[in-house]
Amino acid sequence: MLQAKSSGGELITLATLTPAELKQLKLEKQTFTCPACGSRVIAKAGTKLIPHFAHHQADTCITSANGESAYHEQGKLLLYQWLKAQQLQVKLEAYLPEIQQRPDILLTVDKKTIAIEYQCARIPPEVIIKRNNGYKRAGITPIWIMGEQLLKRKSTNGFKLDSFLQLFIHQFTSATPPIIYFFCPHATQLINLMDIYSVGNGLAFGLIQIRTLQAIQFPELFHFHNFERQTLWRIWKKEKTRFRIRPIKQFGAELKWHKWLYEKGLHRDFLPTIVHIPVPSQHFMKQPLWRWQSKLVIEVLSPLPLGGTISLNRLNAVLRQVQHPQRIFPLIKHFTNPVTEYMQLLCQLGYFRETTPNQYQKLSPISFFSSVEDAIKADNELTIQFLRKVW
């Protein structure tokens, strides 16, 4: 921990003291206690780590996280100092006895209490969910900022989005895009990863904004941006081509999916171009885009005769088992249905129309292909069609 109580009841932050002040503190031989559990703690002020306090036995404290890395401590301190320099009402490692939690930073803005957690290590999802539930009970808004080393970029806009990172997707309103925050204490850079489009199998695309901490103010954390549609569909054009021609994995769920296609007399390369198109709420699905969209198209939408109708309830029933429970997205305030978004796209492309709320009529046949060249050509035409019609 960065703070402890002195024998006089004063909160001391070792990392903010000068070498001379640290030396004087050592000469005074003061005793310090943990603000949460009240037990004695040791002041540690060496040369390798940020000066901090430590329990004699960490597991005796109800807020113990089994130790924090120097990377985490440095980042937490920098974020605290950044907020404090803005004359905000901010506390470092404030203990909340009513929920027995100690957020890294506790902030009050316009009578609203915000807990900022700087998360640098992978811990069980249940721990994250429990902490967020605690903040919810206390009427506190949590904001989680990830250590930059947890961001694994695959390309300019591509990154790895696994089940752990999904826990930290924030979406504050229906009008704002999903966002994940990252901070690098070494470069003092804040990274906003916004307007996230998940593909599946750990791959996603996002609009990445990198700024130095000193260049921004706290309210700017909530200034959001979306992809320009030309940029999004240029990215997806490449992704569609990659999907058509990448080697088939000979193991796991993907092999099982290819066998399912084979049993139906089909092949990935010849699937309709409306399979594997982006929907903003894909992260709510357990399966990659191509798997659940191909299931809907092959089993339900393609066999439906022209003029036939189908309800959203029927479509949801087909995919009920492949949707994540909402509880694993504790930072998302507004939930949308990826199946609804998909059908809205098909309506905009002229394949269906919504006759009544959540009821769709088929207007156009769905074409399969006989060669990968024809499929890629149609995919490219679809991109042009989206740029003209969608949004």
Image: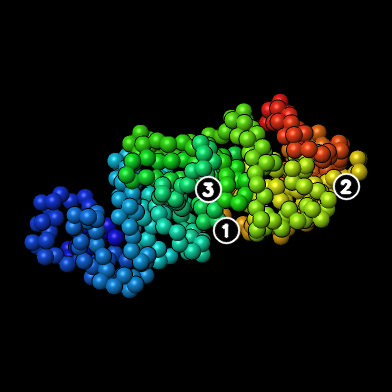
Residue 90 vertical position relative to residue 58 in the rendered view, above or below:
above
Label 2 neighbourhood size at 10 Å, few (<14), some (14-19), many (20+)? few
In this image, 203 relative to 97: left or right? right
Residue 34 vertical position relative to residue 320 in the rendered view, above or below:
below
Secondary structure under badge 1? helix
> In what quadrant of the picture does the N terminus appear?
bottom left
Q: Amino acid at mark 1?
A: Ile
Q: Measuring from the top left, give residue 72's x and y in whole percent.
A: 34, 54
Residue lying furthest top: 388
Specify the color scheme.
rainbow
Which circle's residue, 3 or 1, is located before the other in the chain? 3
Q: Amino acid at mark 3?
A: Lys
Secondary structure under badge 2? loop
Which circle's residue, 1 or 2, is located before the other in the chain? 2
User: Would residue 348 be seen by someone viewing this image from the given angle?
Assistant: no
For the point 85% across and 45% down, which residue is it? 302
> In what quadrant of the picture does the C terminus appear?
top right
Residues 123 and 159: in front is 159
Residues 26 and 141: in front is 26
Q: Measuring from the top left, give residue 88's x and y in whole percent.
A: 34, 43
To which residue does mark 2 refer? 303
Residues 316 and 223: in front is 316
Q: Amino acid at mark 2?
A: Pro
To which residue does mark 1 refer? 328
* C-alpha separation, residue under disc 1 versus residue under disc 2: 35 Å
Dot 3 and dot 1 residues touching (CB under 8 Å): no
Which circle's residue, 2 or 3, is located before the other in the chain? 3
Q: Quadrant of residue 196?
A: top right
Mark nearest the camera among 1 and 2 is: 2
To which residue does mark 3 refer? 160
Label 3 neighbourhood size at 10 Å, few (<14), some (14-19), many (20+)? some
